Image (spheres, rainbow, N blue to C red):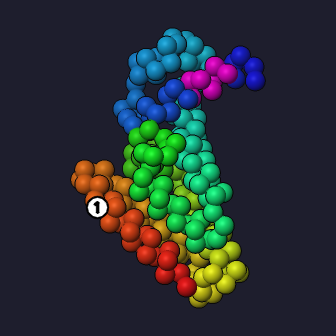
Amino acid sequence: MSKAERTRQFIIEKTAPIFNVKGYAGTSLNDMISATGLTKGSIYGNFENKDEVALAAFEHNLKCMFTAVRVEMDKKSTAREKLLVYVDIYENFLHHPFPAGGCPILNTSTEADDTHPRLREKASDAITSWKNAISGLIKKGIVDNEFSSHIDPEETAISIIALIEGGIMIGKVTGKLNYRKAIMKAVQKMINDLE
């Protein structure tokens, strides 16, 4: 890795938590300078503009999130056990190496849907990727006779995502963790009922 690549990665890693907590609009150049200890010239010498930093930060946060899930899934053997990892991670994400500020897909989606087309597109792609991963696990469960062949993998996958993201959003907005926990129980039941 060249010095420029290391500096770029350093900027991404230091600003990613800020973008995930404060959002694109809420993150200022001063926030980026404070987090990195670099000058404006150093930051914008490695990135064209704030948009480019925000897009790279989102990718970094997304990778952290998916890595935390994959690490836990690798410890499981059945499709059901792997799907239940989502319940554990999202119910207890403070106990996992999850991005500061919570789910970057939810955080970015709610802010960028009408204000930042490139970030919205990245969030949309992330949801599609996540849906495909869950759908793939469900298909494997069907092939392994773990789940009923009558299940629609895509419909079930997007429903699981909607419940998870909705549970996080409701918990954050109301400040009531028991709401998130109740919704995660519904996700758990949905996964356990895939027979």
Does 113 appear in magenta? no
Q: Quadrant of the N terminus?
A: top right
Q: Is residue 53 in sight in this rendering?
A: yes
| Magenta highlight: main SS | helix
Residue at 43% over, 31% down:
18
Q: Quadrant of the C terminus?
A: bottom right
Residue at 46% over, 62% down:
87
Does 7 appear in magenta? yes
Q: Nearer the viewer, residue 65 or 24?
A: 65
Counting labels gives 1
Q: Position of residue 106 (x, y in %)?
A: 43, 51
Q: Amino acid at mark 1?
A: Tyr
Residue at 67% over, 21% down:
6
* Position above or below: 80 against 27: below
Q: Which residue is mark 1?
A: 179
* Residue range corresponding to the magenta coloring: 6-12
Q: Position of residue 13 (x, y in %)?
A: 55, 29
Q: Nearer the viewer, residue 55 or 132?
A: 132
Q: Position of residue 181 (x, y in %)?
A: 34, 61
Instruction: Name which quarter of the figure residue 167 lies in.
Output: bottom left
Give the farthest residue toward the right. Answer: 1
